[in-house]
Structures are given as structure tokens and as C-alpha cells.
Image (spheres, helix red, strand yellow):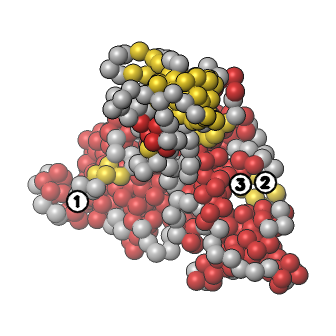
């Protein structure tokens, strides 16, 4: 039987004996080399488990030592596949033996794999899994080359149950960026390769342009910019990401880093993070920062409340209590402070400021309120004679009145007059409001049998007639606001407040 037939029959020892005999006779014969190489591969595959690592690498060394031509692609790609699987198995152990991964990587670096190729991608996945939390990651990824992915590597992966996972490419870019972030070393201080970070940011820009569905690479681009001190750029980078992930507490945590420490928007971001419904153990660091803010502002009751909550969460997780927290709790102000209920109202009161940050790239418009439905929390507004409509206001304001001037950011255009407000606040802007309001004095005209009437050129709707008990022939001073008559398709005036009246 020839070597190939013996291999397929599972008779590896016989296949080896025959292949080795042929190889020793004609060591330069490519077929003899090829046959022996495939026998070594079968042994390699047979020993592909961490428990047999030494045997596995023994056969890998034999394949390397044969120095076969680079065009033996099928063999090399199968070797890459098996080495990737071995790396993944080592990485899947409870305690990862990084020395095995480093040794395996050193051996496979000597082989001429097909790039890109299926086996080469499997090789990446195995070492990515093993080195993702190790300082070896950058060295491995630089050797492998992030430009060697196959087209399918850029797509989301699916489990057998049909669940989708982040693509291996997005995972790679995220992990690479994480390892570029500054590291605080006890002996060497802050370790940060700024030049390498700048180069990788350019790669992030390219990958996001090609795959805008990738969300997290931009997040880590922002963290790298922060590490380089480029706060001026980081907000523009973060905004698209933050809009997608605005319900995640950690989004607001990093948003806070985009501003100077004494900027009021920092506390607004922390407060917003606290409204996102995260588990208590995830919030301990933000609570600590908020407590420090309360202490600096001498709001000791609120500070004590934060400290008690973060200490409780840490103890439940069996985590140590930071020294600074212990110091605070030993100070006189803490002993004299009174624990209050959670500071939820404080967080909510600042949430609108965080929203303003989130949508700061959207033009803010000034509008005036011309009708309010307090039961449904809906108001009608006028921005101009060509833009008017209605929106819900209860997420931003508890009370609003006709004639109020507002600053608002809208999400896109109106749908049959309905707009979605992203940010909203009351402002004093007489120059704007005077375009849509006026004071008048005149005689009320109410026809017999009618519930509404007029004064000068302004309509007095029945609600105002009833509220102020107006009578035909009364002289009144009133405030009017522009209003659009849908039936007549024209603008007019309506009374919304009576200043004084006399019979």
C-alpha cells in the first residue's frame, strides 16, 4: 500500500515507516517530503490537546524542520488550522498556561501560511482567545497582521442556536485598542506608546468607514484620544457611539472624561450614568466620584448616602473598601451627616444636561408655546410661520404655559405635525417672543348664542371666555399669540391671557 492509502486506513505507523524509508533514500524528492510531511500532520492532529502538548509540538517541529516549499499550501494551511485549535484549547483551560501559547506562537511563526486563508483565520481566533487578556496580544497581532482577515471574518458570527456574535474583526480591533491604552506600572510609571496609538486610530477610521455597523471601535478610538490628551476631538468621536449606547452607564462614564474635571458637564454625565439601571456593583466607582463631588460642595448628607451604598455593594461582592472611602467615613462631617434616601431626584435633575451634551451636534431652535394639553403632556409650538407642530414635554418639564419660550432640539422632521424633542428648556427671549405675541386693548364682541368671540383682530376662544367670564361689550387688555387656522390655511391671533377688564 502507498503512504496515502495507509494514512487513510489509520495505519500511521506503517505509513510513517514507508514514508521515512522513501525520504531517507531520496531526501530531495518532493513527493517523499510531501508524504512524510502529511504523516507528521496526522500525528500532529492526533495529539491536538493540551495534555499531549509536547507530542503535538514534537511533530510540529518535524514539519518545520523539513523546510518544505512555500507552495505546499494545503499542508501548511491544515497545520495552521490545527495550531489554532490547539491554542483555543489551551486558552479554554481554567488556568491558562501562557508559556505554552508563547512557545506555540514561536514555532508557527516559522511557517509560510496562506494569507488570507481559512487556516490562518482559525490560527488568529485561537491565539486571540488565548492572548486577549495578556500583554502578548500586541506582539501576536502585529505578527499575524490585521490586514489578513478573510471577507467572512468581517461578518457577525452565528452559534448553532442561531445567536449572533460580534465579528472576529471587530473583536480584534477592540482588543488591540484596549492593549494600547496607558498602563500604570509600579516601576516604570505610565507606559503608553502614543505613536503606535496614532497609527492605530487611522486603522480604526478605515474599518469604521468600511463597516459603519461596528460600534465599539469608535468607543476605543475615543479612549485613545483621551489618553493622548486630545479632548477637543474626543466628543465628536464619542457622540455617534453614545447615541446608540445612551442607556449604558459606562457610556456616560467615558463621556465624562471628555471635559475638564471642574466642568459641570462631568457631574451631569455621572448623574446620567446612575439613571441607566445598572447593577449596584457596576456603579461603585461612579458613586465614589459623586460622593467626592458632594463633599467638595459640602452636601454631606448626600455624600454619606452615596458612601453607604457603595460600601454595601463592595462588601456584598467581597471587594476591598478604598482607603479614601475609609478616610472619609472617619471624618467629623460623616459622623454628623444624616443618611437620606437615594439621590435619584438629584440624578434626574441633571439628566437633561447630559442629553444636551449627547445632542450638541444638532441645531438648537427657539420656539414659542401656543397651546398646552396638560393631561396628555403635549404642547403646540411655533418656530416660524413655516414650521410649527406639537410634541410631548413631560420628559423635560413639569409645567409649561402658552407664551413660554423654549430652546429645543428635534429629532429629524415632523410627522404630520408631530415632532420628537431631544432636549428642552425654558428661556427668556423677548426678541423672539415679540414676533409672535402682542398686547391689545379693545371691546369684546360675542354674538348672541356663541361661546367664543373677538377683540380687535384676535379670536377669544370659549375656554378664555368662560375662564374670565367675559361679556359682550366689555373693554379688556389682553395678551395675544399668533395661531394658524387649519381650515382657512392662514395665520391669525388668539387671546391667551386677560390682563384687566372693565364693564
Quarter placement of the C terminus: top right
Q: Determine the secondary structure under disc 3.
A: helix
Q: Disc 2 or disc 3, which is closer to the eye?
A: 3
Q: Front-most of 187 and 262?
A: 262
Tag 3 or tag 2, which sits nearer the N-term?
2
Q: Where is residue 308 in the image (x, y as percent from the top left)?
A: 69, 79
Q: Identify which residue is drawn at 39% across, 46% down.
A: 167
Q: Position of residue 466 (x, y in %)?
A: 45, 42
**How far is the residue under mark 3 from the one under mark 1?**
43 Å
Tell whether 75 sits left or right of 218. left
Please tell me in which quadrant of the rendered image residue 296 appears.
Answer: bottom right
Q: Can residue 392 be spotted in the picture?
A: no
Q: Determine the secondary structure under disc 2.
A: strand
- From the image, tell me which residue sits under label 1: 161
Q: Determine the secondary structure under disc 1.
A: loop
Q: Disc 3 or disc 1, which is closer to the eye?
A: 3
Q: Front-most of 268 and 14?
A: 268
For mark 2, does the 10 Å Cα neighbourhood hold few (<14), some (14 to 19), or many (20 or more) residues?
A: few
The label number, if any, that marks residue 467 in the structure image: none
Total number of numbered labels? 3
The label number, if any, that marks residue 190 in the structure image: 2
Q: Can residue 467 be spotted in the picture?
A: yes
**How far is the residue under mark 2 from the one under mark 3?**
26 Å
Where 455 sits versus 164, above or below?
Answer: above
Tag 1 or tag 3, which sits nearer the N-term?
1
Q: Are marks 1 and 2 in contact (CB under 8 Å)?
A: no
Tell whether 491 sits left or right of 306. left
- From the image, tell me which residue sits under label 3: 267
Quarter placement of the N terminus: bottom left
Q: Identify which residue is drawn at 47% across, 37% down.
A: 465
Q: Identify which residue is drawn at 62% across, 29% down.
A: 477
Amino acid at each position: 500500500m502507498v503512504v496515502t492509502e495507509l494514512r487513510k486506513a489509520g495505519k500511521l505507523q506503517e505509513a510513517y515507516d514507508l514514508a521515512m524509508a522513501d525520504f531517507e533514500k531520496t531526501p530531495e524528492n518532493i513527493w517523499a517530503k510531501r508524504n512524510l510531511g502529511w504523516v507528521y500532520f496526522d500525528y500532529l492532529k492526533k495529539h491536538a490537546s493540551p495534555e499531549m502538548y509536547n507530542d503535538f509540538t514534537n511533530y510540529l517541529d518535524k514539519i518545520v524542520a523539513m523546510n518544505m516549499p512555500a507552495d505546499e499550501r494545503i499542508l501548511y494551511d491544515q497545520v495552521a488550522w490545527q495550531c489554532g485549535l490547539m491554542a483555543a484549547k489551551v486558552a479554554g483551560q481554567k488556568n491558562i498556561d501562557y508559556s505554552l501559547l508563547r512557545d506555540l506562537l514561536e514555532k508557527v511563526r516559522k511557517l509560510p501560511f496562506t494569507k488570507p486563508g481559512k487556516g490562518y483565520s482559525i490560527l488568529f481566533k485561537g491565539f486571540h482567545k488565548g492572548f486577549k487578556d495578556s500583554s502578548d496580544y500586541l506582539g501576536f497581532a502585529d505578527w499575524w497582521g490585521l490586514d489578513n482577515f478573510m471577507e467572512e471574518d468581517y461578518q457577525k458570527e452565528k452559534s448553532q442556536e442561531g445567536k449572533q456574535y460580534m465579528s472576529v474583526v471587530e473583536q480584534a480591533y477592540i482588543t488591540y485598542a484596549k492593549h494600547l491604552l496607558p498602563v500604570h506600572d509600579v516601576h516604570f510609571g505610565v507606559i503608553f506608546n502614543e505613536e503606535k496609538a496614532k497609527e492605530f486610530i487611522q486603522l480604526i477610521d478605515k474599518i469604521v468607514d468600511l463597516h459603519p455597523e461596528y460600534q465599539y471601535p469608535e468607543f476605543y478610538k475615543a479612549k485613545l484620544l483621551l489618553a493622548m490628551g486630545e479632548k477637543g476631538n474626543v466628543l465628536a468621536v464619542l457622540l455617534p457611539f453614545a447615541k446608540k449606547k445612551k442607556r449604558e452607564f459606562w457610556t456616560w462614564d467615558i463621556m465624562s472624561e471628555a471635559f475638564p474635571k471642574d466642568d459641570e458637564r462631568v457631574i451631569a454625565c455621572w448623574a446620567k450614568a446612575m439613571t441607566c439601571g445598572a447593577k449596584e456593583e457596576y456603579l461603585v466607582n461612579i458613586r465614589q466620584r459623586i460622593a467626592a463631588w458632594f463633599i467638595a460642595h459640602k452636601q454631606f448628607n448626600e455624600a454619606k448616602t452615596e458612601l453607604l451604598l457603595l460600601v454595601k455593594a463592595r462588601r456584598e461582592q467581597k471587594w476591598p473598601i478604598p482607603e479614601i472611602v475609609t478616610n472619609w467615613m472617619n471624618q467629623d462631617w460623616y459622623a454628623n451627616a444624616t443618611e437620606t434616601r437615594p439621590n435619584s431626584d438629584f440624578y434626574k435633575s441633571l439628566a437633561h444636561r447630559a442629553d444636551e451634551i449627547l445632542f450638541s451636534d444638532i441645531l438648537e431652535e427657539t420656539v414659542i408655546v401656543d397651546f398646552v394639553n396638560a393631561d396628555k403632556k403635549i404642547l403646540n409650538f411655533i418656530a416660524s410661520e413655516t414650521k410649527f407642530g406639537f410634541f410631548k414635554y413631560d420628559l423635560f418639564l413639569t409645567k409649561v404655559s402658552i407664551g413660554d419660550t423654549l430652546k429645543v432640539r428635534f429629532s429629524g422632521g415632523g410627522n404630520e405635525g408631530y415632532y420628537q424633542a431631544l432636549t428642552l428648556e425654558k428661556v427668556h427671549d423677548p426678541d423672539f417672543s415679540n414676533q409672535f405675541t402682542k398686547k391689545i386693548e379693545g371691546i369684546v364682541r360675542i354674538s348672541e348664542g356663541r361661546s367664543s368671540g373677538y377683540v380687535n383682530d384676535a379670536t377669544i376662544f370659549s375656554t378664555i371666555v368662560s375662564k374670565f367670564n367675559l361679556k359682550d361689550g366689555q373693554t379688556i387688555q389682553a395678551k395675544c399669540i399668533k395661531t394658524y387656522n387649519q381650515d382657512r390655511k392662514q395665520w391669525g391671533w388668539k387671546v391667551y391671557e386677560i390682563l384687566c377688564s372693565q364693564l
